[in-house]
Image (spheres, rainbow, N blue to C red):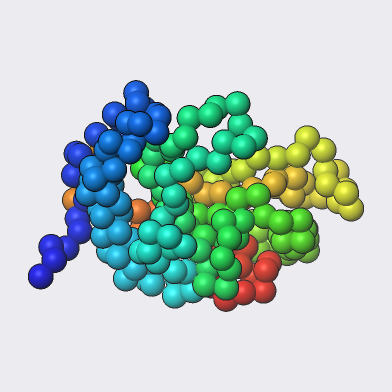
Amino acid sequence: MATAFSAFSPSFLSFFNDLVDNNNRDWFNGNKDRYREDVQQPLVSFIEAMEPELMKVSPYFVADSRLNGGSIFRIYRDTRFSKDKTPYKTHASAQFRHQFYKNVHTPGFYVHFGTDKLICGGGIWMPEPKTLLKIRERIRDKPEQWEQVLSNKKLLKVHGGVSGESLSRPPRGFSVDEPHIEDIKRKSFFAMTEYPANQAEQPGLVKNVAGAFAAAGPLVQFLCEAMDVPY
């Protein structure tokens, strides 16, 4: 019987610390067995442990432990349009997406395990134009609901509020005088928080990540309602 996942072992972050100094294909190919054993297998166990906790946050988000096409992001970087040509990400990450969607530009919960920090929370990253317009219109048309998100005590305590990259000017069709124009100008909507990297090695990891997801819930629920999908 498999041992229940409680936290990552020090070898998990140790792999990424070594990768920072050896971000090349020769080193990675020589350490693939180590990558599978110390990184991939524990990530699968983490995703499986998150599934029942995620169900408590919302039954419409998926914890998929497959290494290809599931919740876990690939380690390979897309370097086509980047000046940085190093081939591998120096962190592990996963997105728990809404069951109605398949790509990363949709409402979801996210966790990032880096050598310098652990990041987790929820929101939507760079949604497609039609989706972004729906979110902006809902903020404009349902200001009282948006204010409930912004003032949610748990969200504020855990994440400090809603953040995300913004336009410098109001988007087309929106007045500069809109009550929540600074939020309407956003291109992404996050409720995220950072923890020390070694939190990944603490026994309460799964519960803590699930708690951060739950605290971001009011934002994710608002985004789902803007897109006419259940939360």
* Image quadrant where residue 113 sits: top left
Image quadrant holding the C terminus, namely bottom right
Q: Is residue 142 left or right of residue 26?
A: right
Q: Position of residue 90 (x, y in %)?
A: 40, 35
Q: Is residue 207 left or right of residue 230?
A: left
Asked if residue 40 is positioned above or below residue 3 in the image, the reply reads above
Q: Is residue 95 left or right of residue 149?
A: left
Residue 116 shows in this picture: no
Asked if residue 86 is positioned above or below residue 207 in the image, the reply reads above
Asked if residue 83 is positioned above or below residue 134 in the image, the reply reads above
**Image mark count:** 0
Residue at coordinates 13% horizontally, 62% vertically from top-left? 3
Residue at coordinates 76% horizontally, 56% vertically from top-left? 129
Image quadrant holding the N terminus, namely bottom left
Q: Position of residue 63 (x, y in %)?
A: 39, 66
Residue at coordinates 20% horizontally, 59% vertically from top-left? 5
Residue at coordinates 59% horizontally, 43% vertically from top-left? 163
Query: Which of the pair 145/111 is nearer the observer?
Result: 111
Query: Which of the pair 153/84 is nearer the observer?
Result: 84
* Image quadrant where residue 71 sits: bottom left
